[in-house]
Image (cartoon, rainbow, N blue to C red):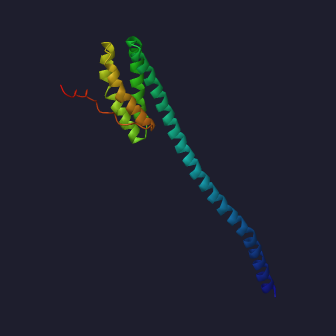
Amino acid sequence: MKRVLAVLVALMIAGAFVAGYWPQRERLAQARAEAAELRRQLSEVGSRAAEAESKARLGRLFGQFLALQDAVTAGNYGEAQSLSSPFFDRVRDEAAKTGDASARTALDAVLMRRDTVTAGLARSEGAVREVLIPIERELRRALGYPVLPLAPATAAPAEAGL
């Protein structure tokens, strides 16, 4: 009888343990699933924030370029020279930072024109404006703006009858 009573008490204790354990186990599993979902969401937000930060840096870079372009358009080559070096330095820095392959390609294309722009500004050549056009297009491409193809140079139409 004592043995049966001991077994019954042991079964009651085991039943009480399982009755208390099972709901806690379910809550733990649910909490772990929620934590995993929140980590995934946080990762997405982090990647979007990094992308937004990269776009903001490119936007500031584009603003620097526009200031350089305005100085060249105004014929203020001295100011353009002072804007040129910091602009190209930031382009180089951003090309090293960015994880976006298309932006890096565009920024590398901009950097390839650095010497031409620097030399043109040093000689105060108005033709440097033409070198700035592809730079603007590359920066627009890096920012994800639409870039229309350049219109082919149109020749003067031949006069009929001459």
The residue shown at (74%, 75%) is: 14
Q: Is residue 9 left or right of residue 45?
A: right
The residue shown at (45%, 20%) is: 67
Q: Please tell me which residue lies in front, 12 or 30.
A: 30
Figure quadrant of residue 157: top left
Residue at the far left in the pictured view: 162
Figure quadrant of residue 111: top left
The image position of residue 146, as x and y in percent, is 43, 38
- Which image quarter is the C terminus in? top left
Q: Please tell me which residue lies in front, 27 or 60.
A: 60
The residue shown at (39%, 11%) is: 78
The image position of residue 8, as x and y in percent, is 78, 82
Q: Is residue 27 left or right of residue 106?
A: right
Note whether 24 is above or below 140 in the view shown. below
The image position of residue 114, as x and y in percent, is 33, 24
- Which image quarter is the N terminus in? bottom right
The image position of residue 56, as x and y in percent, is 51, 33
Q: Please tell me which residue lies in front, 26 or 86.
A: 86
Question: In this figure, what is the number of numbered marks?
Answer: 0
Q: Is residue 105 left or right of residue 67?
A: left
Residue at the far bottom in the pictured view: 1
Note whether 10 is above or below 111 in the view shown. below
The residue shown at (42%, 23%) is: 87
Figure quadrant of residue 145: top left
